[in-house]
């Protein structure tokens, strides 16, 4: 079966750095997305990786290793507004998007 | 403002009733999707449409139907609602099946 694993919940301190991991076992791979979802709101796009390596976008970076079936989202200089759920999703060989259950990130002052 | 809208925002429905959730996008995206999101389970795909006139079944299609008569609209119908269909429903669209998906604000549905 297809599976995407993320930690259920993480806690970090304002101003710090946090890394949210995502491991996947899917039938093929055609790209990986990270989305942010604030409580009671819709998911919003953060990043897309299809090749190995690090993609940096301001305070957020996303890394991919296709051989290890692994990605992480790195958030720097954490702000209170970064408190949200972070969703990892993989496009499989049938071009279907497979979603992880999400990681709830709690930022403490 | 370009984007994707859903209606209603929330609804309480008696079991056995028929309900249509509406979704409209003005981005001229080819692909559209319906998801349900339940606590601890993440997003699950109900139905999708890769282009106007075509639809496909997702992971949890039972009890739901969709139509795609034109590019902009993708309504989701519950023919006879059951309490297990209580959930938050998100509509999304993308330029193609592998592009970034953009989500509507969601419909919170409670079936009693």
Image (tube, coloured by chain):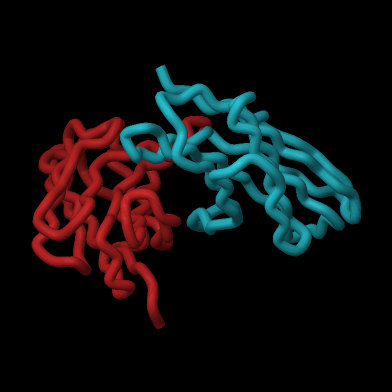
Chain colours: A cyan, B red
Residue located farthest toward the bottom when viewing the structure as drawn:
B1
Residue B84 placement: quadrant: top left
Residue located farthest toward the top when viewing the structure as drawn:
A1
- Residue B6 screen position, x and y as percent: 32, 64
- Residue B110 screen position, x and y as percent: 33, 45
Residue B7 placement: quadrant: bottom left
Left or right? Give the position of A78 relative to A85. right
Is B7 placed above or below A30 here?
below
- Residue A11 screen position, x and y as percent: 80, 39
Query: Quadrant location of the N terminus of chain B?
Result: bottom left
- Which residue lies at the image location 35% right of the left edge and 38% below the top edge? A96
- Looking at this view, is B79 or A66 the one in front? A66
- Which residue lies at the image location 14% right of the left edge and 60% below the top edge? B52
Is A30 placed above or below B26 here?
above
Across the whole image, how many numbered discs are drawn on residues? 0
Left or right? Give the position of A8 relative to A75. left
Is B60 placed above or below A43 here?
above
Left or right? Give the position of B111 relative to A11. left
Q: Is residue A104 visible?
A: no
Query: Quadrant location of the C terminus of chain B?
Result: top left
- Which residue lies at the image location 41% right of the left edge and 55% below the top edge? B99
- Looking at this view, is A14 or A18 the one in front? A18
- Residue B33 screen position, x and y as percent: 30, 50
- Which residue lies at the image location 35% right of the left edge and 59% below the top edge? B94
Q: Is residue A53 visible?
A: yes
Residue A59 placement: quadrant: bottom right
């Amino acid at each position: 079966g297809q599976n995407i694993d993320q930690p259920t919940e993480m806690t970090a301190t304002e101003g710090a750095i946090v890394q949210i991991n995502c491991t996947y076992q899917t039938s093929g791979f055609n790209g990986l997305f990270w989305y942010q979802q604030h409580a009671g709101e819709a998911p919003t796009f953060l990043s897309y990786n299809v090749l190995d390596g690090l993609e940096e976008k301001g305070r957020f970076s996303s890394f991919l290793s296709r051989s290890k079936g692994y990605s992480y989202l790195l958030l720097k200089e954490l702000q209170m507004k970064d408190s949200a759920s972070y969703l990892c999703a993989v496009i499989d060989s049938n071009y279907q998007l497979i979603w992880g259950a999400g990681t709830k990130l709690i930022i403490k002052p | 403002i370009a984007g994707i809208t859903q209606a209603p925002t929330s609804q309480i429905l008696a079991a056995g009733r028929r309900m249509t959730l509406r979704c409209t996008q003005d981005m001229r995206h080819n692909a559209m999707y319906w998801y349900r999101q339940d606590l601890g389970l993440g997003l699950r795909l109900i139905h999708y449409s890769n282009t106007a006139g075509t639809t496909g079944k997702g992971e949890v299609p039972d009890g739901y139907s969709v139509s795609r008569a034109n590019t902009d609209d993708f309504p989701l119908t519950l023919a006879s609602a059951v309490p297990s269909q209580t959930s938050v429903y998100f509509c999304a669209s993308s330029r193609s099946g592998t592009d970034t998906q953009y989500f509507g604000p969601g419909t919170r549905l409670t079936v009693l």
